[in-house]
Image: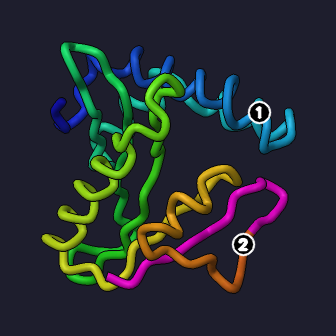
Amino acid sequence: MTIRRMIENDIIHVIELITRNWDEVLIHHHSIETVQKFRAEETGETFKKHLSSKELYVVEDNGQVMATGSLVNYGTAESPRLCVSMFFVSPDYHSKGIGRMLLEHLFSSVALQHAEKLHVPSSRNAINFYKRFGFVVDASQPDESIEITWMTKEM
């Protein structure tokens, strides 16, 4: 099993993985409107844009993409404001340590960038996952209508 930077050929597999999560897992924790909204945002064109603006990673085993996650910097190189983004593990591989492995990989990248905090917009079902890694729910939630819980970890 390897973690590597996402390439354009991975896009179709990543979209399938994310769509399966929305359809098989997140639908049980979020409204249909939220699921439809976020599913509609995951297109090939969106991911092509993300390839140049985010650190996109995949976890792969024997040519199969099993998970994806990224870091995006909303700050500057001198003062990074890093956020975990598009973090999904294939439903077939939930609770097998793949999410932990990928998140720890992202932590290593955060450390290299000397960020003091790491933020994540968590789906309802992933809050306890992120808590296990030291994230805490932010006191202020910018838009509860999108059913996302913002969390932060001190690095």
136 vs 140, nearest the viewer: 136
5 over 144 or under it: above or below: above
Horizontal relation, residue 31 to residue 85: left or right = right
62 vs 14, nearest the viewer: 62
Residue 70 shows up from this direction:
yes
Residue identified by numbered label 1: 27
Residue 26 in which image quadrant: top right
In the image, what residue occupies the spot 28% across and 49% down? Answer: 101
Residue 45 shows up from this direction:
no
Q: Secondary structure at mark 2?
A: loop
Q: Give the image location of residue 66, x and y in percent.
A: 36, 26
Residue identified by numbered label 2: 142
The quadrant in which the N terminus is found is top left
10 vs 49, nearest the viewer: 10
Q: Give the image location of residue 90, x and y in percent.
A: 47, 27
Magenta region, residue range = 143-155
Q: Is residue 145 magenta?
A: yes
Residue 76 in which image quadrant: bottom left
Q: Give the image location of residue 99, x and y in percent.
A: 39, 45
